[in-house]
Every structure is written in structure tokens, then in C-alpha cells.
Amino acid sequence: MADFYPYLIPSLPVLQFGTKPPFSYEQFLDMCHRRIPEPDYALLSSLPQAPEYPAYEKGQETIRKWIDFDTALRNELVKIRAQKIHRDPATSLRGSVFGDPFLATSTAAAMGNPSLLEAELALDEERWNALERLATGHYFDVDLLITYAYKLLILIRWENVLNADAARMLHCVLETPG
């Protein structure tokens, strides 16, 4: 079954940060379903997202590296936000991942942006670049599909943000008590 990776991966459209996703995540999984081994498909169909990171105990190296990076980025955000409200960040830090000084700098630069939307975009671009680095050296394997899947999820997230009905959301927030 793994012989289908060289056929599946080149058939996937190239993803570029800031562009519209070519298809839904469900469509991506459907394209992979009969073309990759069942354990790899199960892995792709249950990729851990941020709230689930502490529960992830599987040994897949690319997923573990992604979780380590994203946790480090989130820890940098915690440090910045804690400093603004004069609190100790130690109570909110996750994992035992030590921050990268370059990550601290880029996170601080993003958080310094007065536009929350632009700040979030800069953070997701940092995530995208980390996924690009994780994909290096992987051409026809599940590791490349994992990084592709996380990139697709970033694009889908932004598509949802940009297509949200801002007036309706504001109305809901203003109408919600307390």
C-alpha cells in the first residue's frame, strides 16, 4: 500500500500561506483513505490539535516535533501576556519545552502589532514556516502528509475567519449577557 505515496503526494495541490484552501479536510482524508496504509490514515484522521496536546502520547516523530514547536510558541504567548498583567507565567506554561530565542522574538513582534488579526496571521505564518522545516527531507511518506494536513488546517481556519459574518458575530457578542 505504501507504494501509492509517490502517486498521491504529487497529485495534491501545492499549499501556499495566505491562499484559499483547495479543499476541505474531509476531502483531503478521502483522497488519502484508499491510497495509504490504514495505520497512516488513522494517524491523519486523528491529528491532535492544541487543546489535545497533553493527551497525545503516541510516538510519531513529526507530530511530536510539531506539538513541541506549537507548545513553545504558546508558552511564549503566555510569557508576553503574563508580563502585561504582572503575573507569574509559570502557572500557565505547558510542557517541558524550552523556548527558542528566535521564536521569542518573532512572537513578541507579532504581539506588538496593534491589529489582533494581523498578530494572529503573523503567528500562523510562524507555524507555517515551522511545518515547512519539518517537511524538509520528506517526499513520499506519512511525515509529509502530516505537515500538509496541518498546513491545510491553517488555511481552512483563515478561510473561516475571513468569511465570518462580522456584523452577526458582533451582534451575538453584544447580546450575550455578562
Image (cartoon, rainbow, N blue to C red):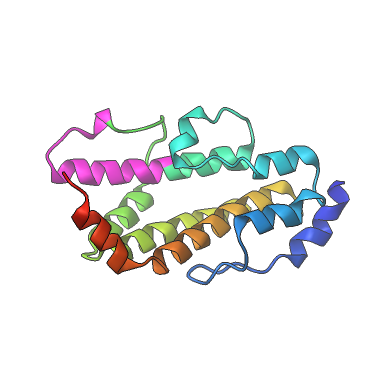
On the picture, is 63 further left or further right than 158? Answer: right
In this rendering, is residue 46 above or below 54?
below
Q: Is residue 88 magenta?
A: yes
Single out the residue that lies furthest toward the left.
86
The secondary structure making up most of the magenta span is helix
Q: Nearer the viewer, residue 78 or 136?
A: 78
Which image quadrant for residue 167? bottom left
On the picture, is 73 further left or further right than 5? Answer: left
Q: Count numbered badges in the picture.
A: 0
Which image quadrant for residue 83? top left
How far across and down, in percent of the image, does residue 30 sit? 73, 54
Residue at 67% in and 48% down: 143
On the picture, is 85 further left or further right than 168? Answer: left
Q: Nearer the viewer, residue 96 or 18?
A: 18
In this rendering, is residue 160 above or below 130?
below
Residue at 67% in and 57% down: 28
Residue at 68% in and 69% down: 13
The magenta-colored residue range is 71-91
Residue 168 can be seen in this image:
yes
Q: Quadrant of the C terminus?
A: top left
Residue at 56% in and 67% down: 21
How far across and down, in percent of the image, does residue 111 sit? 26, 57
How far across and down, in percent of the image, does residue 41 sit? 73, 43
Q: Nearer the viewer, residue 171 or 30?
A: 171
